[in-house]
Amino acid sequence: MEYTRQEMMAIATGREFKDGELAIFGVGLSMLAGFFAQRNHAPNLMAFTEGGVYGSTPIGGLPWGIEDNRISANAVSFTGAIDALGFLVASGRVDNAVIGAAEVDKFGNVNTTGIWAPGTEPWRVGKYTLPRVRLNGSGGANEIAVGAKKYLLMVTHEKKRFSEKVAYISSPGYLDGGNAREKYGFPGGGPSAMITTLGILRPDPVTKEFILTGYYPFASIEEIKENTGWDLKVAPDVQVIPEPTAQELENLRAVDVTGSLRKK
Amino acid sequence: MNKSKLITMKEAVDKYTYDGMYFAHGGALPVGSDCISFFREMVKAGRKDIDIASNCNTQGTNLLAAVGGLKRMEVGFSGLEVYGFANGLKRAVESGQTILEDYSNGSMPIRMMAGALNWPFVPMFMNTGCDQQWASADDPENYPNTKKIPEITDPFTGKVCGAFTPIKPDVAAIHVTMADIYGNAIMLGTEWCRYELSRCSKKVILCADKIVDTGVMKQFPNLVRIPYVVVDAVVYAPYGVWPACSTGLYDSDEEHMFYMNKMLKTEEGTQEYLQAFGQYDDVWDYVDMIGKERIDKISATETAFLMDPYRQWIKTDAEIKELLERR
């Protein structure tokens, strides 16, 4: 069966959502993963956007944004940011969520703010310097990172994106690992998995370092280690993740009507 | 409530905006519901050194940054979502022209709420334990920063959280779907931070896609989240969110969103863009500039049915011209 790596990543992400969960999907491909889950196996998944658009499903293709008319045409409630991101997300109520990331590190910290030349990262030089490339900032991902009971990181698996330590923490994962999150009042549990274009990494329960727990049929442990910027540990029971079923692909493509995930 | 606050876009920018002001805009969402045509008018007027509290970047802040008018910005999200990076803003930040202070999409509206409540500060755990707290573009030498979001102790539990400054802009321009001439407004789609913004700003200008009769407010008073008492001026701004979307009225103009952002990538492109899309006189001229073909295309929105309950109260262009002349 033909499918792209992006489609495999979206389906693997979607499989992490359980029926009946209260969920918030980000913008772009992560939104497709969420709505795929709702269509495929979690019809009672309760989804909303960070602007407080409730009960809707996208029509006419991938929404251009979380406030786009493509996600506002069949909603049952419109509220605002403090309601959705504050009352439901940062407060600790939301069960599951997805965050996209430009860069992640071995403790699941996320950088979506900028790219610094190696050696000039703020934490390394002890001052804030301008990034070489300015990215988009955290958006609502910071609220998800501190508040969601658990959440998924969806990342293209490339060495430059998988760092020992991110240049800038836009959204906190497990910080320096272990119980480092406990110092802060974060009600959320931290990231439960990194779903990548090659496989799945999950945090060690004690150290919180992400280790390889599964890889896709078209990938290999060696390829994944080569594309990871830290010395990636492999779980003793690492598994090959089942490829998409015909039904999963059909449901994903019904959501991804404009083919955003089919571009290679 | 019997005094009309309806003025033209040019009058609003002349009267309420000035160089160096602390400005805010809303919804401040990259793809929808911001007062983009108000930004175009500020650019026409040559406003500069603007300090902005912006929940998210939009094509409005992207344009203001591209022409060099944006001195500083506090922001939760600086891109254009699926439309990509905001090239004008990105260029201004990377060159050091615009100081960009990072927050998140949840902390910005809560800071506005704190401003509305006139609180001295507001405690949150968002943006703490990470570089939004530790790195400050305003105070770059102090890392980890202790002034931007000072760490405080919850007096009840002993846990750590962050203290945030409230946002109280000098002026806010807020897009609304419809408003009457007195400043009562109804928004369709996500309200985002507009409710809080209308309460925390010293001056509030509404940019309304439709001017409506007050009868609609009396029919649906629960929907009037911005009442006349907090509003200083009402501007008729049809297609004012273009090329982004206004729920119930028009979709985002995909071609123009990409085109505009591509042009803002360079100074030359920005000038070329303004030659083509910054040379109109008034609102009627602005609508002609967008053109019937584009307007027909974006108006074929799947959300159009949301406007059905309100149509009988919408004022025609002729009625609005008369209301403006009668002042």
Image: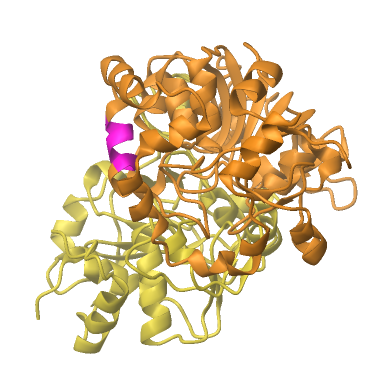
> Chain B is which colour?
orange
Q: Nearer the viewer, residue A113 or B61?
A: B61
- Image quadrant in which the C terminus of chain B is located: top right
Dominant secondary structure, magenta = helix
- Image quadrant in which the N terminus of chain B is located: top right
Q: Nearer the viewer, residue A211 or A249?
A: A249
Total label count? 0
Question: Residue placed at 60% from the left, 28% from the top?
Answer: B9
| Picture coordinates of residue A160, whole percent (x, y) | 25, 41
Residue B128 visible, this angle: no
Question: Residue placed at 85% from the left, 36% from the top?
Answer: B3
Residue A42 visible, this angle: yes
Q: Is residue A28 left or right of residue B245?
A: left
Q: Is residue B137 left or right of residue B167?
A: left
Q: Nearer the viewer, residue A188 or B231?
A: B231
| Picture coordinates of residue B121, whole percent (x, y) | 82, 35
Q: Is residue B122 left or right of residue A23?
A: right
| Picture coordinates of residue B72, whole percent (x, y) | 56, 20
Residue B38 falls in image quadrant: top right
Residue B260 covered by magenta stretch:
yes
Q: Nearer the viewer, residue B243 or A133?
A: B243
- Of all chains in the rendering, the one displayed in yellow is A
Q: Is residue B247 left or right of residue B86?
A: right
Q: How is the image coloured?
A: by chain
Q: Which residues are magenta?
A: B256-262
Picture layout, residue A70 above or below residue B88: below
Residue B149 covered by magenta stretch:
no
| Picture coordinates of residue B290, whole percent (x, y) | 37, 38
